[in-house]
Amino acid sequence: MNATTAHPAAAGGELTVFKVEHPEGKAISYDLEALCKKLGIDDPGRLVVETQGYLGLVMVYPRNPLAAVRAATREDLVMDRHGRYVTGFYHNGQPVKKRLFDPSTGSAQRFVLFGTTGAGKSRTLQLQLIAEKINGICTWLADLKEGQSVPEAAGNVDWRVTSQEGTILMLMAAVKVAQARMRRYSALGRNSFTLGADPLLHVWIDEANRLLERGAPYRALATYLLKELSRTGRSVGVGIGLAAQASHLEELGGSDTLRGMMKEGEVVLLRWTASMMRQLVADGILPGGTQLVPIPKTLAPTVLHSPFDVAGDDTDAPGTQGMAYYLSGQRPTALMRHLRVGSIAPLPGLDPEILALYGDEAPRRLEDASVQALSGDIEHTAYASRNDGPAMDALCAQFAAEARKSSEAKAGRRSAAPADIDDTSDDYDGDGEDGEDVTLPPASLEGRILAALADADAPMAAEDVLAAVNADSGRKVSLGGVRNVLTRLAKHGKVAHPGRNQYAPAD
């Protein structure tokens, strides 16, 4: 069956639609180039194909329906009653609504955003981050392109880091927040998250391939922490998002947990590689036999010139940044394009259009109960230092140095141990999913002090605590540093203070 009709999405022309069906009930496959030739189309951008098993629609537009898209407004980004916001439009002009939260189940979402270089990943992530701020979501962001991917996010999210060490500290803190909320909600008899006093917490890792690819210094630990968040976060309002340029899932930790995120999460596929497409089908994220019309780098039609042709205008064709497939939506094979965010032309500094979308209001902060749950640990020190650049840099440098020391010590023990002894004493949970070591992060001063107090038979003076801490093979510390931490731990109820200069574990 075919029909030709005027359609608003056809931009003033006629849209021709062919409904096709495989006569043997098999999944439809097609050769895009051959199909264009058969239909007399010189511009593949005019052709849109959607398939669902043995059924398909072939649509021929008078011009590319996604050549231009309007700018995003703050109204687009407000969640509806189903927890969704307008992120863009399909080729037929229908809005694409992406879910931020599922109020019917109380589940925080998992997000995966893939795209090759120049596909519009950074602007798409900006759209997501702005929507999160507008809707009162507490956002933690790791921008692993040294902060260059989404610079306007600085000051518009609750916590932003730009190093791998900072990312690990952030993930550790998110795991502790999820675990603390789980205990708190259990005591209240709650089995799911509801929007209210506690904000949704979304942890985003941009350029996640830098953290999770083979050879990355914290690959196994990062994968482990992501696995823990996937286990504990959904029912307590802690979501996780990955934005990456990976061409294969093995570049993202090689983890079944990450594959699970893609199968159950909100997945957006910008311009992709052939190997990634094969992997999506192989892992069941897309049904077997599914084909997606490739997204070109530009919208220029293919034109052949003979050596005798006079050179024409060499004007650049429009790009395809932001074109994508929303694989988690109701129409995973329908081409869409995200709303425009910010200036089209490059700017020498921060983009005022993007800043205007973020707005002047302060971002949503982590609730006090979760901040208190971090007290006494290195995660609390990291969170408290999030707006103090030098302090955060020093903490990350300390983390890196102690992580190297711990890794070297473990390697030395294993090389000296008999072959039949498996030393996993420093592991979170044995080895990583692909056999890599999952090394414990270095203990914080707070943790070392709490351990010293727990080992003591009676309350200790600050000087005794100092001696015990400096004897635990960790970094040497000063009496002033020990006193400061003891004061903070006592203030937050982590340590009892029975008398002057006397400290003991809290009951």
Image: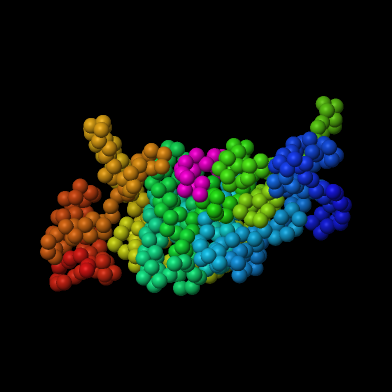
Considering every residue shown, the one lying at the far top of the view is: 307
Colour setup of the view: rainbow
Q: Can residue 408 be seen by looking at this rendering? A: yes
The answer to whether 487 is drawn above or below residue 53 in the figure is: below
Q: Nearer the viewer, residue 212 or 72?
A: 212
Tell me the quarter of the image containing the C terminus: bottom left
Q: Is residue 147 left or right of residue 450?
A: right
Q: Which residues are magenta?
A: 245-260
| Residue 256 placement (x, y as % from top left) | 47, 45
Assess whether residue 472 is covered by the magenta stretch: no
Q: Is residue 463 left or right of residue 86?
A: left
| Residue 490 placement (x, y as % from top left) | 24, 69
| Residue 493 picture quarter | bottom left
Residue at the spot 75% in from the left edge and 50% down from the top edge: 67
Q: Nearer the viewer, residue 175 or 132?
A: 175
Residue at the spot 33% in from the left edge and 59% down from the top edge: 381
Q: Nearer the viewer, residue 299 or 332?
A: 332
Q: Is residue 312 left or right of residue 354?
A: right
Residue at the spot 55% in from the left edge and 59% down from the top edge: 129
The answer to whether 66 is drawn above or below residue 138 in the figure is: above
| Residue 212 placement (x, y as % from top left) | 46, 43
| Residue 191 placement (x, y as % from top left) | 44, 67
Residue at the spot 23% in from the left edge and 55% down from the top edge: 448
